[in-house]
Image (tube, grey):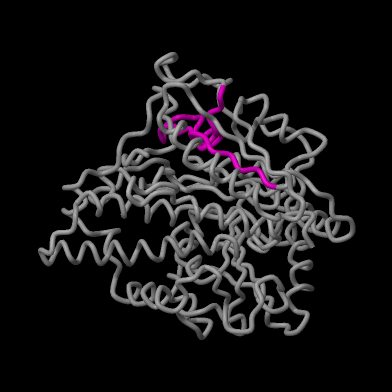
Amino acid sequence: MNDEELLNGIDALTGEPLPPAMDDEEILRDPRDTVLDEARFHEYQWFLENFSDPERRPTEGVDPADLGSAGWGVIWAPDLGDDVKAALEPLLEHRRKQATRRFEHYFRAYEYRGQTKQEFLSEQGTSWGAADPEKVPYYLLLVGDPRKLPFEFQYDLDIQYAVGRIHFDATGDYAKYAESVVASETAAAAAPVPRPAVFFGVETKDDQTSQRTMAEMLRPLVAALSKEQTDGFEIRLEEKADRGRFRDLLSGEQVPALLFAAAHGMRFPPNDRRQLAHQGALVCADWPGRSARPEGVPREHYFAGEDVPDADLRGLIACLFACFSAGTPERDNFSKAALGRPQPVASYPFVSSLAQRLLRQGALAVLGHIDRAWTTSFTWSEKAGDQTKIFHSTLSRLLHGHSVGFAMEYVNSRYTELSVELSNLFIAQRERRSPSKDLLRRVRKARNDARNFIVIGDPAARLAGIW
């Protein structure tokens, strides 16, 4: 096992790996984005002490598998049109019926007005601690443009709640998504049909990142999940994952229930007209690697949103382990200049076209990255050994019928733990107790990596066929 942290991202113009994150010295020069403020530090510390186990539920007695117990809410972006709200009404009515089985106030609708998480919760008469649906529902769907409803608000809220987001460019796509979620759940409840769980892996000859991802994450995950009782799901690994095969998986007679794809994600510069359509697209096995094609990645070698077939993807949950697969922030969370003058990576933050297209075609949810994805997601060091347990636990929870929001508690726990650890390490450094600079850098990467892994879609969604 290699101790070096690598990232799953390719520069579209050169075919080279994305540039490294900040060096050991730079992370010490400016603690912003590294040390938690006092209030947040105490909040995260409280969660570690009281809810360190991701098996945690919301408040005692609340069942996250039952919306009538956990509640469900929607948070509208500012100035969101009434046409969008009307388009989502089938989903809202569906969730309203589920959430208000016992109490009317377990379904809520909120208007976001630029608040921080703590300001938002204070307005509802609550603060940090276990999610209490008497105050705020456990499941929260954010609706709207991340320019007006920031990714940062989503990250913070996700510590306590099961959070997802949807944003489309066309009102009709909101209607399609709402209709597909309701239809999928209704059909699954009436006649569940077993469908496979497919792991799509790209391994390029001269690329260490893809080789490590296959050897240290995908194969161990498939081996571990294959040993479990996963309600009849066939667990399958696709190792020759070219662009045509990916399209076939999404257009065949039996679309997977769960699709886990691990590949390089494409990154385009902010001034490139292709960025909105192709950022976060998956580099497929067609690409022979940068040594063979030094001029960049040809269009026919990666799979973007526009490549998703016009097929019925209802019931699918996709987990995309790739840079920018869920979306792109305005500023780089990892670059060498990120702590001083943050480098722009886009003119504005946006949800990836690939995630949007999958949901438009009927997928229930997409789990993916905002910004870059690192090998610290699944390996830590040679001494620490296998770190795939978080992904294994998340996927196992999905395959056993839990919601995507509840399954993501494993990732959220990792983010919380690493945030507190990073603050403690930096404070120790400031007090001249001298923790390893390499450890500071590694923990910061892993913290941001866990924070940026989010749900695009309704967090209450769960795999079709398990009801």
Quadrant of the drawing holding the C terminus: bottom right
- Camera-side residue of 388 and 289: 388
The total of numbered circles placed on residues is: 0
Bounds of the magenta segment: 258-285
**Up/down of 264 relative to 27, above or below:** above
Residue 197 lies, with reference to residue 405, above or below; the image says: above
Q: Residue 255, located in which quarter of the rendered image?
A: top right
Q: Residue furthest right?
A: 190
Image: 458 above or below 198? below
> Which residue is at 29% across, 70% downward?
37
Which quadrant is home to the N terminus? top left
Residue 314 pos. (x, y %): 77, 47
- Image coordinates of residue 327 in percent, x first then y, are 51, 46
In percent of the image, x 67 and y 27: which residue is there?
Answer: 245
Which percent across, then down, holds residue 94? 78, 66
Going by the picture, which residue comes out furthest to the front?
A: 227
- Residue at image x 30%, y 67%? 36
Residue drawn 70% across and 58% down? Answer: 462
In the drawing, does residue 131 fall left or right of residue 42? right
Per the image, is 87 magenta? no
Where on the picture, by quarter, is residue 13?
Answer: top left
Q: Which residue is nearer to you in this view: 111 or 412?
A: 412
* Farthest-out residue, top: 292
- Nearer to us in this view, 217 or 246: 217
Q: Quarter of the image holding residue 20?
A: top left
User: Residue 270, percent across and down?
Assistant: 41, 36
Q: Looking at the picture, does residue 80 appear above or below residue 211?
A: below
Q: Is residue 202 left or right of residue 103?
A: left
